[in-house]
Amino acid sequence: MTLSAHNARQWDAFYKTSQTRVPYTDAAVFAVIALSRDPDAVVFEFGCGNAQNLGFLRSLFPDATLLGCDVSEQALLKGRRTYDGLGLFVSGDALGLKPGSIDVILERATLQHIPKPLAARYVREMYDALRPGGRAFFEVASTDHGYARMGDGSEDPVFGHRVFYDLEELRALFSDFQVDQVFDRRRMQVEGAGQQNGRPVYDEAALQLYLTKPA
């Protein structure tokens, strides 16, 4: 069984019981601002899950072109049943995106479940699909994340394959983009946790990147 198939099975099991419909605030706000400026913008979410972000956008922008992919067919099935008019498809080793066809890219906590060489290919394809001047939001688990001590490629019992990035790795991964802003987003520090390689160990730590494709 390939890693993608293995991860798909784990995510399918997760989404069979998940009832999540709450959009992720930072990604949703990023897209709302973009669509408010240009209602004709095409939005694509990489790793959309059951499409709660895209469904929220649909409620505000009924005529927008909203696309999303995910490894889990079960997640997409829920998205199709819950929200109307979304272009949802299963992601394979390539996304099949048309070059220069997208204005806005959203990604939150998906790249951290993909082996780094494949993640780099996805990012390259998304960059090619983004129109010049298009914008992107990515949030990726950092090496300060509590699970990072398990190492790249570790196996999570629920979410499968895990990888982590430091800032320099992300700058290299997104080197073709213009980096507009980077935020270090953290949630509560694990009680009683000490230092790992001189840095605090956090329950959740991620880097948010706000990017533009040069015109």
Image (cartoon, rainbow, N blue to C red):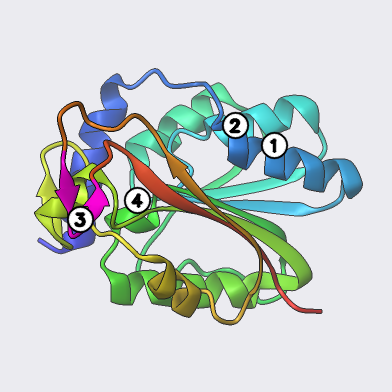
> Label 4 neighbourhood size at 10 Å, few (<14), some (14-19), many (20+)?
many
Find disc 4 in the rendering and name its residue.
71
Q: Amino acid at mark 2?
A: Thr
Depth check, mark 4 against mark 2: the one in front is 2
As rendered, which of 106 and 199 lies closer to the eye? 199
Q: CA distance from mark 3 to mark 1?
A: 32 Å
> Label 3 neighbourhood size at 10 Å, few (<14), some (14-19), many (20+)?
few
- Sequence-earlier tag: 4 or 3: 3
Find disc 2 in the rendering and name its residue.
25
Depth check, mark 3 against mark 1: the one in front is 1
Q: Residue at x 60, y 81 (%)?
A: 176
Tell me residue 41's x, y (percent). Answer: 81, 53
Find disc 3 in the rendering and name its residue.
5
Q: Residue at x 44, y 28 (%)?
A: 78
> Label 2 neighbourhood size at 10 Å, few (<14), some (14-19), many (20+)?
few
Find disc 1 in the rendering and name its residue.
29
Q: Quadrant of the C terminus?
A: bottom right
Q: Amino acid at mark 4?
A: Val
Q: Which residues are magenta?
A: 194-200
